[in-house]
Image: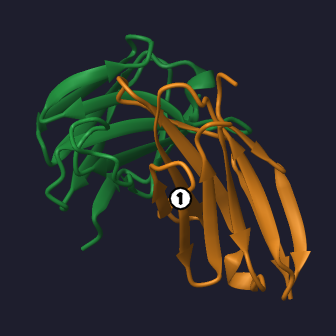
Amino acid sequence: ETGVTQTPRHLVMGMTNKKSLKCEQHLGHNAMYWYKQSAKKPLELMFVYSLEERVENNSVPSRFSPECPNSSHLFLHLHTLQPEDSALYLCASSQEVPGARGTGELFFGEGSRLTVL
Amino acid sequence: ILNVEQSPQSLHVQEGDSTNFTCSFPSSNFYALHWYRWETAKSPEALFVMTLNGDEKKKGRISATLNTKEGYSYLYIKGSQPEDSATYLCASCTSGTYKYIFGTGTRLKVLA
């Protein structure tokens, strides 16, 4: 069983659809993250959760709505997306957020490739 | 430097060559620097976590150095092998934030 699992791996949706991306970590970590990877751009941090509390919202449009029901699960709810939102969405976890005794590495899932038509 | 910058963007080397990449990051309020390897169709995997000025880390043929005062880190690969082909990412974290900010990466292709 891999450490961080993301589903679905691929998603195609229309601009009026509502869909969700799911991330699950089996590492006992307290921090979880959503990153966006667009072509030719660096990994872009979207959200950070520490012990189910959102601690960072990196100026992300409201059409992206995160949810962290417990420290093992993280969702990204998608609604009324635009074609420019097409990207690879990566989930990651770490033992702690930076500063909370945490400098440890991020453990990533394999990503969800999203295409918005 | 306000962002994390990596150079070169891409690199082709012959098997057996040694190579190195650069990561530049904001030096003020430095907290930690990470190096990751990202192979195609896989997830990024951590290579090194570095926190102290002058840190040197090594894992097999790969090593890294850190200069927090001037805001740069080098990644070295000795005797490159085809399986080293990947994108190498660095990520910097500043004190008082929860953000690991990534560079655009260096894409390495090792030719057999």
Residue B43 shows in the view: no
Q: Colour of chain B?
A: orange
Residue B55 shows in the view: yes
Which chain's colour is green?
A
Question: On screen, A40 above or below B40?
Answer: above
Residue B40 appears in which quarter of the rendering? bottom right
Residue B10 appears in which quarter of the rendering? bottom right
Q: Position of residue B110 (x, y in %)?
A: 82, 77
Question: On screen, A16 above or below A111?
Answer: above
* Element carrying mark 1: loop
Q: Position of residue B6 (x, y in %)?
A: 74, 44
Q: Quadrant of the C terminus of chain B?
A: bottom right
Q: Position of residue B71 (x, y in %)?
A: 65, 37
Residue plotted at (62% across, 64% down): B64
Q: Which residue is mark 1?
A: B55
Residue closer to the observer: B50 or A82: B50
Question: On screen, B69 above or below B95?
Answer: below
Residue plotted at (37% across, 45% down): A91
Amino acid marked by disc 1: Asp
Residue plotted at (62% across, 59% down): B65
